[in-house]
Image: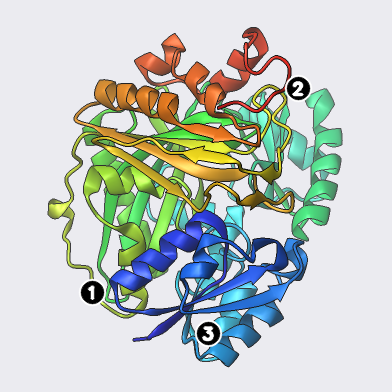
């Protein structure tokens, strides 16, 4: 049990965690950089501590400052949110070594699932379907790498064992490209992740991105909470998410979810987690596990009625799950649009001061944001400023509610991608459900968008 939670994050997720803590009667400590001094979660915290200047390396990634703040404020637990240090096994280890609770899996689990090769081996042992390819790293033997790729059949994917966020991967179309791809990807992986280890998998050319949400306690109980479709991506970054995944057989999701639950039991997982899959031609293939709360968790909350962040904290407090698998029923459909402070045509970040921030409302509409009029959007962090979520009795109603919500949203003083989302929702493939992970990039290539032609802020 614990009484005080230090929230090692910023923005909407810090505010979201804070609200869950307040529901549980927990005291909260907000840490903030100098750029976030006027942020909402800072104003609403029981205690707020400045941990450094705007650059993340000097503030939100400063482990010593975070641990010192926890000690000085009496925080006996730390919630990392997503991004920053949320999947940093070394940080989780230090938190636990200090006698505090890290609200997430233990350090060994984070480390194991953060290594894509080790994660794949664990999934294969649990019977979770994986992308075709060996679960061993590429050696320095070039002939062996060529033999592996030839056996899989081109195209193949060269991937970094420690990769993430769309980095550390390259598609190889033929044998003539393989040696260069291995050399370049290994160097990128060494620089970005400190780990040059690579492996080879079959490249799937028209998959969807489908994920399974799991929740596990410390007493051996584990459940899955259905699926999400996150196929609409730009440069491997998710743009729009929905639950459940349209057009995917429910019985297949049920069976896959039980496999994921069994995998969690085998690796001793605790807390929230997400299994990410490629889905092509009726077959699922595991690609990675995220050992934290996801940006898109609200769509699962909307269709299950379960407060995932509150449940995550309660699990960390030692509580047993109050649900069995049979209690989890998905109701309706939910869609989330990530609203970013960026030019809708060039996608260049648009920092500045928000002069107007009018939010939508009505049945089934939820907005997760830390922004209000007068707030300055710094250039030092991710561009996301809000998550707009629409829930309906079915997908058609959710889509319609999202269209109305986007039309009601007015943001001035900065540029946003709001109208980019409105364009996406008019696309026939998106409307019918089931676009592949390449669809949005292809749509951008062939569509001339009429969004803020003179580069003026959009409302």
Quarter of the picture holding the N terminus: bottom left
Residue at (53% x, 50% y) in the render: 371
The answer to which quarter of the image holds residue 234 is top right
Question: Is disc 1 placed on a helix, strand or loop?
Answer: loop
Mark 1 vs mark 3: which is more N-terminal? 3
Residue density around tag 1, few if under 14, some if 14–19, many if 20 or more, within 10 Å:
some
CA–CA distance between discs 1 and 3? 21 Å
Question: Is disc 2 placed on a helix, strand or loop?
Answer: loop
Q: Is residue 147 left or right of residue 410?
A: right
Task: Return the x and y of residue 266 as percentages of the image width and height.
Answer: 37, 65
Q: Nearer the viewer, mark 3 or mark 2?
A: 3
Residue density around tag 2, few if under 14, some if 14–19, many if 20 or more, within 10 Å:
some
Q: Which residue is mark 2?
A: 174
Q: Nearer the viewer, residue 40 or 32?
A: 40
As drawn, the label of residue 96 is 3
Task: Return the x and y of residue 82 as percentages of the image width and height.
Answer: 53, 58
Q: Which residue is mark 1?
A: 320
Q: Nearer the viewer, residue 168 or 306?
A: 306
Q: Is residue 41 left or right of residue 197?
A: left
Question: Is disc 3 placed on a helix, strand or loop?
Answer: helix
Quarter of the picture holding the C terminus: top right
Mark 1 vs mark 2: which is more N-terminal? 2
């Amino acid at each position: 049990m614990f009484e005080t939670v230090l929230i090692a994050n910023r923005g909407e997720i810090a505010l979201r965690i804070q609200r869950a803590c307040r529901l549980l009667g927990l005291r909260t400590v907000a840490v903030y950089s100098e750029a976030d001094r006027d942020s909402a979660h800072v104003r609403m915290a029981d205690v707020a501590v400045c941990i450094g200047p705007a650059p993340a390396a000097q503030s939100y990634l400063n482990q010593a400052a975070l641990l010192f703040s926890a000690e000085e404020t009496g925080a006996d637990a730390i919630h990392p949110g997503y991004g920053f240090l949320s999947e940093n096994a070394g940080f989780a280890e230090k938190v636990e070594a200090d006698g505090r609770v890290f609200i997430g899996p233990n350090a060994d689990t984070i480390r194991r699932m953060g290594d894509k090769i080790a994660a794949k081996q664990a999934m294969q042992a649990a019977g979770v379907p994986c992308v075709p390819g060996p679960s061993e790293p590429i050696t320095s033997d070039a002939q062996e790498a060529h033999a592996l790729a030839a056996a899989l059949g081109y195209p193949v994917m060269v991937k970094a064992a420690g990769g993430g966020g769309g980095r550390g991967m390259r598609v190889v179309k033929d044998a003539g490209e393989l040696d260069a791809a291995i050399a370049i990807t290994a160097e990128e992986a060494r620089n970005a992740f400190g780990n040059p280890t690579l492996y080879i998998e079959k490249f799937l050319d028209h998959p969807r991105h489908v994920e399974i949400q799991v929740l596990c306690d410390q007493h051996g109980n584990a459940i899955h909470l259905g699926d999400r479709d996150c196929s609409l991506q730009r440069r491997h970054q998710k743009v729009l998410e929905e639950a459940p995944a349209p057009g995917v057989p429910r019985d297949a999701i049920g069976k896959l979810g039980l496999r994921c639950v069994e995998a969690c039991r085998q690796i001793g997982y605790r807390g929230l987690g997400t299994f990410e899959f490629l889905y092509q031609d009726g077959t699922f293939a595991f690609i990675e596990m995220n050992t934290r709360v996801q940006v898109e968790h609200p769509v699962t909350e909307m269709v299950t009625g379960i407060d995932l962040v509150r449940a995550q904290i309660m699990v960390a407090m030692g509580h047993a799950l109050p649900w069995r698998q049979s209690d989890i029923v998905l109701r309706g459909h939910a869609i989330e649009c990530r609203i970013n402070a960026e030019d809708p045509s060039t996608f260049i970040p648009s920092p500045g001061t928000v002069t107007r921030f009018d939010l939508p409302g009505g049945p089934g509409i939820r907005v997760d944001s830390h922004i209000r009029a007068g707030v300055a959007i710094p250039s030092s962090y991710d561009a996301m400023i809000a998550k707009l979520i629409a829930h309906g009795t079915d997908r058609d109603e959710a889509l319609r509610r999202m269209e109305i919500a986007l039309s009601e949203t007015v943001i001035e003083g900065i540029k946003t991608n709001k109208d980019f989302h409105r364009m996406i929702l008019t696309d026939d493939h998106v409307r019918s459900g089931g676009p592949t992970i390449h669809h949005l990039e292809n749509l951008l290539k062939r569509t001339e968008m009429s969004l803020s032609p003179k580069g003026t802020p959009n409302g």
